[in-house]
Each structure stands twice: as structure tokens, then as C-alpha cells.
Image (tube, grey):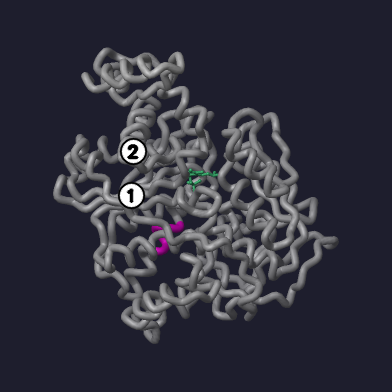
Amino acid sequence: MPLSAASDLGSNQQTSQSAAADASCMFRCIGCDATAPTAAQDFRCAHCGNLLEITSPAWTSSAVKADILKSTWRARRSSNEALDLSGVWRYRELLPNPALAQHVVTLREGNTPLYELPRCARLTGVPRLFAKHQGLNPTGSFKDTGMTVAATFARQAGCNWVACASTGNTSASMAAYAARAGMRSLVLVPEGKISWSKLSQALDYGALTCQLRTDFDGCLQLLQQLVKRAPVYQLNSINPFRLEGQKTQAIELLEQLDWQPPDHIIVPGGNLGNSSAIGKALLEMLEIGLISSLPKLSVIQAEGANALVRTVRETDGKRLITVQPETRATAIRIGNPASWEKAVKVIRATGGTCEEVSEFEIAQAKAEIGAEGIGCEPASAVTLAGLKKFVRQGFVQREERVVLILTGNLLKDPDFTMEFHKGELPSEELNTLQSASLAKLRHPPIVLDATLDAVVGTLEQAEKI
Ligand code: F0G
């Protein structure tokens, strides 16, 4: 039966119901396991209301040979075909595929580097420490890996309008992919709670941008009502096509590690789509035989936006505890994460855990990653802060191989970086030790008279430090 990306759209939506994906794919409810060839606009199960995921028996059938997949994917690295140049569609054997290759909307996403982090390795006492830098995607975040797939199916279904609620990165990515596909885009963001650089991306890519007087959770709730009233197709990570694309972060990572699984992958958690996608990829890769063991997958949240951490601690992962979110890591300022059950499942299945980190720990870790010459946005830095906590707790041992997923680019939130270096962040009370450790990481700009003596004097001062 054909998989339709956008059935049940509003009547005035221009859809092509015949726009079918890979015929072997279906939607499966994560709660009651019911399957269906199509999904309603809210991507929830018609029987129990839980979220849907996409699955295909073809991905894990015994006919799929891990060695053949590996060699096919490697060979595509030397091809100049648009689909092969994408670090997402290169792995199309494990993705839903559109009816026609021309439907694919790509900006050459994926293809992100895996860096060693020698300084952070020394700091944490974990010598084999790596960062997979998703901030080097076309719009500066991991969102592009999912957006290419979801935008492709939106275009195939003939959508005029796509929409999302966002803390900034999803909206930047959606606006770009919609523009490439010739679709219009509607962005709902919390007023004053997202960084200007992310907002400016949505404006430049031509989105209709609404700053709502609420938080991210309020924006997402409103979008859920909107998709039932207006002919817009939602591209939040509730849309399971997004998560299929985001799976490729893990596939590409394993390929870069020559299919030798790391011991631990650490990822930031907000709405919890990304951890769910990475976990789904790890489980599928194990089933196919692409890897022979599972890395632990752990999720780190900010203390002020710790819904998953509280849910696991206080209800054993059975009932979501929502929180009133507050953190300067605005990308993950989320209190009612939509994909919490998917995340709990993959954390459990891989033997990982979840943890929370303070604003001080986030600011410190961000500067430490910056000092490696890499840099990331605050939400990404929770991974290093979380790793330090895991080492202290004994959950990560020094001989383990650990990969941090850096989700966003340093340039996504320049205000945070400037305020940090000028000594204005974090705003919480610090003890003497904490203040001293941050002082060493700060590099504020120095205003001087334009004279040789002034610059030489400053250089000499710096030499002494
Ligand atoms: N890191 C960054 C840089 C993000 O932008 C996000 C989410 C996350 C981590 C968390 O990922 O939600 O899948 O758990 N940003 C969304 C947005 C919510 O609207 O841009 P998640």
C-alpha cells in the first residue's frame, strides 16, 4: 500500500494523494503498535493518540546485506549525483524514498565532520573523545538532516504551506528547505526567547514569521490546533519523516568510525526528537548487522528545562512531568517534550541514561569546546558538561570511546558568546572556584588607541599569562 506523506490535509490544500513513497513503508504507533499506510495531520495514532514512527520491513529484511550496504555507501562518496552528494540520501536504503528522485529537496546536508577533542579529553580524563559537529550543516544545525526528508515528502504531496513551532533552528532549516522546494513556510516562535541569528535566517529564507507571546510549548500547542483548521503541513519533529532523516547522523558517524561502535553517544535533549532518531538508527543498524554492539545513548538537558530527567527519576519514565522551562540555552528551552516516550524507549534499549546540567556548567563547557577551535551553540555544550558529570559518577569510564553530538553552530547565538566573554554570564551566583575557572576561559575584546605602543604593550601583557 502506498505511503502518503500528507493525507487528510485541509480540503483547500493542494495535495496529490497519489504521491506515494516507498511502497514498503508504513506508519506504526509507538504506543499500541497499530500500523497504517497513511497518517493524519497531527501524526498521531487513530486508535490511542500516541505518536507514529515510520518503519519498513525492507530495511531489516534478511535480504539486506550489511557488507553490500557499506560498500554501496562508500562508493557513493565519489559520485557527483545530487542524491549521493547528500549525507542523508546517500543512505537511502534505510529511508523512505519519494516516488521520483526529482522530488528530493536537498542542500547537500549531512557530510559533517567527526573531530577529536584533545583538550576536552584531557579535561575530562576520557582520552578517546570525539565530537560529531552537526552545526556544520547548511543552515547550521542538525535539523537539516531531517528537513530534507520531510520537505521532500511535503513537496511530493503537493503542499503549498509548511509550518513549525520552533526555538529557532527548526524554523531556520524549514524556511530554507521550503524556499528550495518552492513552498511557503509559516514559523511560530516564542517572542524574545530565540536568538536573533536564527530568527534572521527564517526572515532571509522568506518565511512568514510570527513571534508569539508564549514559550515554545505554547507555540507547538497552537500549531497542533492550526493543522486541523488551516491547510498547513507540520514539519516539527512530531512529523516522523524528520526523524528518518535525522537517523543518518548516526549512520554517518558509524561509517566514519569504520563501523566500530563507540561506547557512548551523548546528545542534548529538548523536544526529544533527535535522541529518538539517533536511537532508532542504532537499533536498526544492530538488527541489520551493520554494527555488532550498541553504544549507550544518553540525553542531557539544562537543569531549568529538565522534563525528561524528572520524568525518568520521579515516574520511572511512565508519566511525563512537564516543567516551566528556563535556560539561556534557548534551543532546548522546552518544558513539554513531544517525543518523550520515544526517547525513554531508546535510552532504555541502549543502556544509556539522562542527566541535567547547570547554567554554569553549560557556559563553561561551551567555552572549553570553543577553545578547541570548534565552537558550538550553548545547547550543544550540555553534552560535554554531561560527560563530566558521568565521569564523576563513574557511569563513563576513562577507557571508553565517547562521541558528543554538537547540534548547532557557534554563530547561532553570538549574544551568549559575547556576554560570556564580557563576564555577564552565567547570571547565577558562583563560588570562588567556579568564578576562577570561568575567568581563565574568558577572552573579552580590548579597546585601545590605534598606536603601535598600545598593541605591543597588550601583547606583552598577554605573554605573561
Ligand atoms: N540542540 C539544538 C541546537 C537544537 O536546536 C535543539 C532543538 C536541540 C538540541 C534539541 O533537539 O528537540 O530533538 O531534543 N531545537 C528545536 C527547534 C526544538 O525548534 O529548533 P530535540
Dot 1 amino acid type: Ala
Q: Residues within 10 Å of mark 1 (few under 14, many from 20)?
A: many
Q: Which mark is residue 131?
A: 1
- Determine the secondary structure under disc 2: helix
Q: Quadrant of residue 296?
A: bottom left
Q: Which mark is residue 450?
A: none
Q: Magenta segment range?
A: 277-281
Left or right of 414 in this view: 366: left
The correct choice, above or below, for 288 with respect to 235 in the image is below
Along the line of sight, the residue nearer the viewer: 340 or 106: 106
Q: Residue at x 68, y 49 (%)?
A: 205
Magenta includes 279?
Answer: yes
Q: Which mark is residue 369?
A: 2
Label 1–label 2 contact, CB within 8 A: yes
Q: Residue at x 46, y 48 (%)?
A: 135
Q: Quadrant of residue 233?
A: bottom right
Which quarter of the rendering shows the N terminus? bottom right
The correct choice, above or below, for 125 with respect to 287 in the image is above
Q: Residues within 10 Å of mark 2 (few under 14, many from 20)?
A: many
Dot 2 amino acid type: Ile
Left or right of 90 in this view: 105: right
